[in-house]
Image: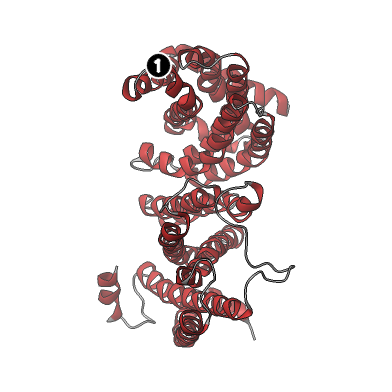
Amino acid sequence: MNWSKYSAPLSFYPLAGNMIPWFSALAALAMAVGLYIGLLVAPTDATQHDSYRIIFVHVPAAWMSMFLYVVMAIWAGIGMGLKARLSFMMAQAIAPTGAMFTFIALVTGCMWGKPTWGTYWVWDARLTSELILLFQYAGVMLLRTSIDDLRRADRASGVLALVGVVNIPIIYFSVQWWNTLHQGASVSMTAAPKMAAIMLTAMLLMTFGFWMYSIAVVLSRVRCVILERESQPAWGDPSSVPEVAEAR
Amino acid sequence: MNRPSLWEALRGVVRRDLMLAMRRRADVAMSVFFLVIVASLFPLGVGPEPAVLRTIAAGVLWVAALLACLLSLGRVFTADYLDGVLEQMVLIAQPLPVLVVGKVFAHWVVSGLPIVLLSPLLGLQFGLDGEALGVLVLSLLLGTPTLSMIGAIGAALVLGVRGSGLLVALLVLPLYVPVLIFGAGAVTSSMAGMGGEANLSLLGASLVLSLFFSPWATAAALRIALE
């Protein structure tokens, strides 16, 4: 099977349309089970009581915020290396979802910080660098919208996304490099997890759910981008064009 | 016609940019005055208590230096972009990243070095003394070239874009944050008696990293802007 066929927006459009329901269903299922285990099955924490349960949203959202940035930069890099239009469209479609997860991670962190640390916000290394990540997403999106020439907008925001990747390891390792208020990672690939298995299950299920959600949303957004850019979509359903314009 | 060597090309770019800057000294003076004015606004706004001023000195001076550097970014490429010199630079047989290093170095000499030289005076106004003052100068000496290097990427990305002055701030300021943290942290920790070496080393590492990567990114951005 020739996979490179799908690098053309023309043939990717229907493929994405076929994949969206599957990823949406997986996302809904994983999130439903994850929330059920996390909120109802997992035991109450001895010191933090029920307020710890926000980690089932907070940690997966924070992971996704960093992961999606790297994925966006990789798509932009592929786009610049191979001069593929679809890669830039993917990068464009990922940015808003990544920014949303960054925002969710920050807001849920604030909500958790108030009962646990006694304050909504501290200028701690991880919080600050996650905030910077939000600004970087904003910068990439703003740069794209302020350049009218699509080709240049794609490549300029791609360069910016690639430059910003330096921040990702800084965020990830900030809790190890600087001894600050935010605790270290609770889960790692190499050591045994420092949390109960049931909590870990819920968190991993939520992460999987968020991941599938991101794929579904990015695919449907990339379909909109394709429709927008290929202004005469003889192959698509022309009646959907006004819908897209409205959804924007 | 024999081709000038890499070193000659680099020297030529630096010489030309410095000469252009010397012909328009008002531009250079502006960013220095900006720094002094911003720094003097804080004692007026916060109040003249020496203890308070000493604690905020490092942060205020670093933020002022960062903003002064940001304001001068428009001068790195814009004039050359408008009169077509930049296009020739992309076309000639010398590697573009090397020419970028030359332009950024000239920009630093014009807008970063005056800040470094002026900082002991401003530090004294804020009640810094002895070792902290030395660390402030050293941190700015290591930090401002990094700011110019990172800023050049942003300046190249927004060439010819509408609202570029504001946009470059939004693009570049997030990337400036680590430099700000290390720079101000060096002064603060030396005032606390811990010595600024750790933060100064990190500043040095940032400088080396940005010296290595930023010319490539800037060159790529310039090619995108000019195609």
* Image vertical order of residue B179 relative to residue A194, above or below: above
Residue A138 locus on image (x, y percent):
41, 53
Q: Which residue is mark 1?
A: B33
**x 65%, y 35%: residue:** B211
* Image vertical order of residue A163 relative to residue B8, above or below: below
Colour approach in the figure:
secondary structure
**x 54%, y 31%: residue:** B184
Q: Regarding mark 1 in the picture, which secondary structure is present there?
A: helix
**x 37%, y 54%: residue:** A145
Residue B226 locus on image (x, y percent):
49, 43
* Image vertical order of residue A75 relative to residue A206, above or below: above
Q: Is residue B224 visible?
A: yes
* Image vertical order of residue B94 relative to residue B50, above or below: below
Left or right: where does residue A194 sit relative to residue B70?
right
Q: Residue furthest front?
A: A46
Which amino acid type corresponds to the residue marked 1 in the rendered image? Phe
Q: Which quarter of the figure is the N terminus of chain A placed in?
A: bottom right
Density class for disc 1 (Cα within 10 Å; few <14, some 14-19, many ≥20) is few
Q: Which quarter of the figure is the C terminus of chain A placed in?
A: bottom left
